[in-house]
Every structure is written in structure tokens, then in C-alpha cells.
Image (tube, rainbow, N blue to C red):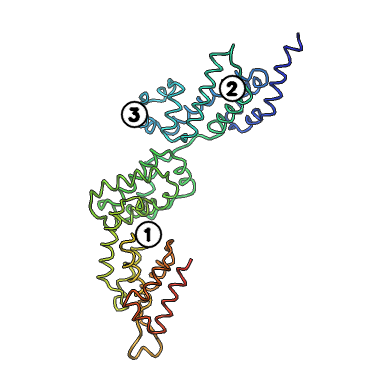
Amino acid sequence: MSDAVQIVPVANRALIEASGASSLLDRIRPEWQAKEFILRVARLLPVDPSSACQRLFNAAIHDLKQKIVVAGLDIASEAARLHKLPAVARPEDIDVYNVTHTISLAYRMGLLSHPEWRQLLRVYDIRRDLEHEDDQYEASVQDCFYIFSTCIEVVLSRDAVHLLKLTDVKEIVEQPQPATLNAAVLEDYRLAPSPRQLEIYRFLIATALNEKHPDIVRQNSYNTLGAISSHTIRQVIIDSSNEFMGRLDRRVPTLIEARVAYAAGILPYLKKVVLTDFFRVFYEVMNASGFSFKNHEKHGELLRNLLEVGGLNLCPDEVLPSYLEWLVLCYIGEPSYGQWSGFRHVFFSNTGAPLALELFAKCERDLAPMVNRLADASKRVKQACENEHVARRFQEILDAIEK
């Protein structure tokens, strides 16, 4: 009889050890490793896996509540209001949150991804089975491993996020000198949940576009947007683009608005008709300036502005051929004449030509077929390329854009 009683615990112990559940405990953060709570889990796991699983899950929920408070009660309060969860105003309000509300609030704040939210809810279902049906349901090896791996990898192994606050960003951009973000600030921003990132994005966009602010503050806001855009959650960029469309209210963006939108990464998300209208208006300015070398003094600012709204990458197909012809003509120039022709075979814009070639080179689209067609389709390009020296410059463009 004694052998029959002992065989199940021994088998469980061997299977649990083989599953690797106990080794996962080593991945828990040091601050939790030292707590008696986790030490008790380690002792219980071989002899009472159900209790060990319940205690570990309780620890994970407690840790999640602490992270919610650290992340910021302002974000917790707003997330709770938007998603109809119990009101949050003080840390004590989080203390009395039940398990489901805690997991949901952490997810709505961005502390958990959607898959992690679902995993923790599944763990909670298993934990309730273990808690309320002890006489019918005992933790299996699969249960133990799933609960341990989820609680530890999703919660207990991760440090609390010390969020970058909006006031921190304000202090950076409102300095009376050019501001830069160090690696620590960028990392804090990257780890911030979407509500905090969106709050910061709104502030920076509004500040960069507000003419009442000093130029240095607007420039710092613009530069900061460019620095953090690659660390921004995609949904924040999409939400910002929708708000930006509301700001435009069906009008064409100004150049400054387009520059800020591009720095923020939201320009590609604007409606196609808005982008088309903007690039049509911009081309009118290009056309009025002229591509001739005689207008070289206008080319620097003009083409640098084009680079600062994404160059040719975002130019809609409807207007792209016009841009390509203008830039080709600006770069290839025209045959020289008069006293200068003896040592300079082609007259071209010393300012505009390098920028035009840069625009071609930086474009990620396959422009070669369209540029090649210009040699026959554009009378001006065809006529200019009848000169061998101009034709050589046309070939330089093709060399720069062939993928």
C-alpha cells in the first residue's frame, strides 16, 4: 500500500523536473527571487504542483499591480475610463482590483500585448480549476509548464517600466539650445505604453506647428519627432495620422505641416488625395522656379524641402512623371555656349544638380523604366541629350537609380 501511495508523487516529481518548469524559476527577477513567496513555490512544486501554480500566479498578479502603479496612475485612470473598468485614482484602487480587471487594465495600458493578455487569462482559467476543484482536478505537467512559463516570461522576469513622462519631454525640447535625446530616454520612450507615446506625440506635433513658440523649441520638437518615430508603436502613428487629418480639415497641408508629418512618420498614412494635392502644389512651386542653371539660387532650399518630405518615395504616381522630368532636366543641364564652352561642356545648376541626383539615389522605388522613357517621351530631354556631354550626364542618373 505504501508503494502505491508513493508512486504518483515520485512520478510527478520526475515529470515536472523533465518539463523544465523548475528551471524557469531562475529567470525570475532578483527582487522576487529573494522573497519567501518564491522560495515556497520552489519547495511546493515537486510535492504539490497545484499549490505551486496558484502561488506563482498570485505573485504574477501582485507584480502586475505594482507595474501598473509605476507606469502611471494618469494612464491607468484614462485606460480604465475608456474601457469601462473600475475607476482608478489612487494606488489603493489598484490594490482592490480583481484578477480579470488587473490583467485587462495592464493590457489596455500597453503593459501586455494582445497575445500575452490572452495567455494570462488562460492561466487564470487553469488556476481557478486548481483552486475550486482540488478533489477532481490536479495540475498536470502541461499545466505546470504553461503556468510557470507564462507567469515568468510575461510578468515576473520583466522589470517594471519607469515611464518617460510628458514633463520630461517638455524639459528637453524647451531648452534654449539644440536638444538631443540620449539612449536612456529613447529606451524609456520605446518601452512606454501606447497612451503615453500618443500623449508625447500629440505634444511634439502641436509644438512643432505652433508659431507662438520660439523657433528653437519648434525645431527641438521637430528633431525629437524624427528621433523617436522609429521607436513608436504603429497604432500611435496611425492614431496621430487620423488626428492630423482632422487638423487639416480637407485643405492641402502646408510645407511645414508636411515636414512635421514626415518626421513623425505619419505622412504615408494620410489619405492619397491629400498627398496628391500636396505634391501637385509643390510641383507648381518647382515649375515656377525653373530647372535652368540660371535659377540655381532657388534650387537649394527648394530641393532640400523636397527631401524633408520624403523626396520621391511618397510622390503619387499621378504627378511623379512631372517630378522626374524636372529633376532630370535640372541635373543634365544644357550644352554650353559662348566663352565658357571651351572648358565647361555643360551648363547645369551647381546647387540643384547634386540635390537632384541625391533625390534619385535615395528613392526606394524602381525609377529606371520611367527615367529611360523620358529619353524619347520628353521633347526637352530628348533634345538636350542630342549633345554627347549632356547624354553622358543622363547616363549618370541611370547609373544612380538602377537597382
User: Residue drawn at (57%, 24%), measured in percent from left and top?
Assistant: 56
Find numbered disc 2 in the image and state the secondary structure of the residue it sits on. helix
User: Residue drawn at (54%, 24%), measured in percent from left and top?
Assistant: 57
Residue type highlighted by circle 2: Cys
Residue 70 lies in quadrant: top left
Task: Locate the N terminus by quadrant.
Answer: top right
Residue type highlighted by circle 3: Arg
Residue 37 lies in quadrant: top right
Q: Which residue is mark 2?
A: 53
> How far, Cα to Cα, is label 2 from label 1?
53 Å
Q: Nearer the viewer, mark 1 or mark 3?
A: 1
User: Residue drawn at (42%, 63%), measured in percent from left and top?
Assistant: 363
Q: Which residue is mark 1?
A: 310
Residue 383 visible, this angle: yes
> Is 300 above or below relative to 274?
below
Find numbered disc 3 in the image and state the secondary structure of the residue it sits on. helix
Do labels 1 and 3 touch, CB within 8 Å?
no
> How far, Cα to Cα, is label 1 from label 3?
38 Å
Residue 81: which disc? 3
> How far, Cα to Cα, is label 2 from label 3?
32 Å
Find numbered disc 1 in the image and state the secondary structure of the residue it sits on. loop
How dense is the environment of label 3, judged by Cα within 10 Å: few (below 14), some, or many (20 and up)? few
Residue 21 lies in quadrant: top right
